[in-house]
């Protein structure tokens, strides 16, 4: 008989106390004898992407039960980036990723699960669960809660969360009235699910398909469709098959898988946060992944989709076009996907793609490799005097006229200062907004700068103004927004020495970002400029600030 991990808590006379506790829960001897499957649920009542995950968990458990396993559900925390945006709470968003991963490790080590089904949906929960999965290396399958629907505004334009953020800028610039702002507020987020564009949550849930850890449809089936429930049941059934085939996360999350995920990332135009998260997951998997690989893959991978914020399409449109697997099929046909990579289903990714039956009702969402939006991918990594260790930009969301730009620096030491200046009309055409001391350690927590970028876009300046930061951006950000500048200001990075009025050169096609200031002047500034370190930090965020790595290393706890 095959030895199970759960035998540690249920086999032998000496385990009578542990069995008695399982029986206290209500488990029968038959249930105790079966494989114990942990259902890792991120349900809570404050995140719209997670409000319905009790239903998803119930379906997963039904699948596990029908396939002969015993499900045991436990919960982890989850932060809504949208609610946390624009205030001190955002400092805890990225930091929560490590808490989630660590808490899953605690639960798995204490309770000896044989297999795991992970139920994430929103931004940091997906990578946190992937980090935990590969760290524990217990057979695992992922099934998300699915994306939110996007509704039309009555004028043919589909709304999403970004519509509300940009509407604030438009209102403050007298471009819309309070009535229109209220309409957008009431209708841009119509129900449960992860926000409807190719933002971070949906980016990561789509990438799970390319990584091979999730079933087809994971990233695109809308949250409110019954097919999402059926997918969850199938995930519960699949974990039992994964267990039998003895497939582990480290068999799946290999270098091949990460390259496939990055290729899909470039084709879809995913969030810049995907770079941060893939680096962190690869670190857990002990796979050598650096920023140079991203540019290598980006240069040879065409951008096939223009999903919000880069274009007008949303996740429901990608689903109607055949979903992630349809994009993977197109990439595989062009020789850009390694089909030999293993999946949680015990089949190769190539075999899974070839076996997919596509039902396509939209032909305008996914372009062919022969007719892409661009011949290069959605994300680029920039280097130069400002970012010797790299910076990240979603180039597919940058207006053509801003791909190459020189402008005077407008320098701010916090997000709040920058937002005040933007709303106050102090930023003008040609400027480069610099927001520093918002990095992983210096922030701490590497806040997302959706509020300032949305303010710029909402005021109609996204084709004229760039923004650079050692913080990061929401997947909803559009425009010449360059983040993850490494080293960060708090660690003595060059961004700390930029002064008001300096000329900054941005050349995205050539992967450059430079400060046009002579070396003598810079040397003088380094001798006279005091690096600002936030004091009086307490609790978890203080420990995080002390121990977090640079953004180019995934901002992981070391």
Image (cartoon, rainbow, N blue to C red):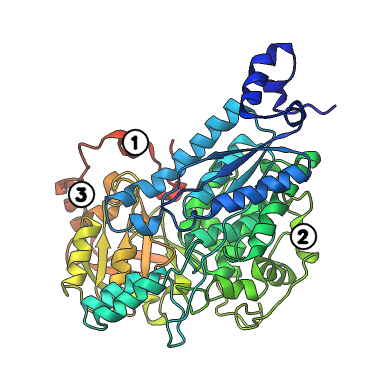
Q: Secondary structure at mark 3?
A: helix
* Mark earlier in primary sequence (3, 2): 2
Number of numbered markers: 3
**Left or right relative to 251: residue 492:** left
Image quadrant holding the N terminus, namely top right
- Residue 191 against residue 70 in the figure, above or below: below
Q: Is residue 464 visible?
A: no
Identify the residue at the far top of this view: 14
Residue at the disc numbered 2: 352
Query: Where residue 410 sits in the image (x, y, percent)?
Result: 20, 66
Where is residue 138? Give x, y as percent: 67, 37
- What's the distance in space between the residues labelled 3 and 2, CA to CA? 55 Å
Residue annotated with mark 1: 540
Whether residue 73 is visible to the viewer of this picture, yes or no, is: yes
Where residue 135 sits in the image (x, y, percent)?
59, 37
Instruction: Report crowding for label 1: few under 14, some 14 to 19, many 20 or more residues within 10 A (C-alpha).
Output: few
Residue mark closest to the camera, 1 vs 3: 1
* Dot placed on the residue nearer the N-terminal end, 2 or 1: 2
Q: Secondary structure at mark 1?
A: helix
Q: Residue at x 35, y 71 (%)?
A: 185
The dot on residue 526 is 3
Answer whether labels 3 and 2 touch (C-beta < 8 Å). Answer: no
- Residue nearest the observer in this picture, 16 or 270: 16
Real-space CA distance between mark 1 and mark 3, rounded to the nearest whole angstrom? 31 Å
Residue at (70%, 72%) from the top-left corner?
Answer: 330
- Circles 2 and 1 in contact, beta carbons < 8 Å: no
């Amino acid at each position: 008989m095959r030895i199970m991990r759960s035998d540690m808590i249920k086999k032998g006379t000496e385990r009578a106390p542990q069995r008695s506790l399982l029986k206290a829960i209500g488990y029968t001897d038959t249930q105790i004898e079966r494989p114990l499957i942990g259902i890792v649920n991120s349900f809570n009542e404050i995140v719209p992407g997670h409000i319905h995950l009790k239903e998803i968990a119930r379906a997963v458990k039904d699948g596990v039960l029908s396939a002969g396993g015993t499900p045991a559900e436990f919960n982890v925390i989850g932060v809504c980036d949208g609610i946390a945006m624009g205030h001190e709470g955002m400092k805890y968003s990225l930091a929560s990723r490590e808490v989630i991963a660590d808490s899953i490790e605690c639960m798995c080590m204490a309770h000896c699960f044989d297999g795991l089904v992970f139920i994430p949906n929103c931004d940091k929960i997906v990578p946190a669960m992937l980090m935990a999965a590969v760290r524990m290396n217990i057979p695992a399958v992922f099934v998300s809660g699915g994306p939110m629907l996007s509704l039309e505004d009555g004028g043919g334009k589909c709304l999403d969360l970004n519509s509300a953020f940009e509407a604030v800028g438009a209102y403050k610039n007298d471009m819309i009235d309070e009535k229109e702002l209220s309409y957008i507020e009431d209708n841009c987020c119509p129900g449960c699910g992860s926000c409807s564009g190719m933002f971070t949550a949906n980016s990561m849930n789509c990438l799970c398909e390319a990584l091979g850890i999730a079933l087809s449809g994971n990233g695109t089936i809308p949250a409110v469709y019954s097919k999402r429930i059926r997918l969850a049941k199938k995930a519960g059934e699949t974990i039992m098959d994964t267990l039998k085939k003895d497939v582990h996360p480290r068999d799946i999350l290999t270098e091949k898988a990460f390259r496939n995920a990055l290729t899909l990332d470039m084709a879809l135009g995913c969030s810049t946060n995907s770079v941060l998260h893939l680096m962190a997951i690869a670190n857990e998997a002990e796979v050598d992944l650096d920023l140079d690989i991203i540019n290598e893959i980006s240069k040879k991978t065409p951008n096939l989709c223009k999903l919000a914020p880069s274009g007008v399409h949303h996740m429901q449109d990608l689903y109607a076009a055949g979903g992630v697997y349809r994009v993977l099929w197109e990439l595989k046909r062009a020789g850009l996907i390694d089909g030999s990579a293993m999946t949680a289903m015990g089949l190769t990714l190539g075999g899974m793609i070839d076996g997919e039956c596509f039902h396509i009702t939209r032909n305008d969402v996914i372009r062919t490799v022969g007719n892409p939006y661009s011949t290069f991918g959605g994300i680029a990594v920039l280097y130069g005097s400002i970012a010797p260790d790299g910076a990240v930009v979603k180039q597919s969301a940058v207006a053509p006229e801003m791909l190459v730009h020189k402008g005077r620096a407008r320098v701010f030491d916090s997000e709040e200062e920058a937002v005040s200046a933007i709303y106050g009309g102090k930023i003008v055409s040609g400027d480069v907004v610099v927001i520093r001391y918002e990095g992983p350690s210096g922030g701490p927590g590497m806040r997302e700068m959706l509020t300032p970028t949305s303010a710029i876009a909402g005021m109609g300046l996204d084709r004229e103004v760039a923004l650079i930061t050692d913080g990061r951006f929401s997947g909803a950000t559009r425009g010449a927004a360059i983040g993850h500048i490494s080293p960060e200001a708090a660690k003595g990075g060059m961004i700390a020495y930029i002064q008001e009025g300096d000329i900054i050169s941005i050349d995205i096609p050539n992967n450059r970002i430079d400060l046009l200031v002579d070396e003598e002047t810079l040397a003088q500034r380094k001798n006279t400029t005091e690096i600002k370190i936030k004091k009086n930090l307490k609790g978890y965020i203080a420990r995080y600030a002390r121990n977090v790595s640079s953004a180019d290393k995934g901002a992981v706890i070391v």
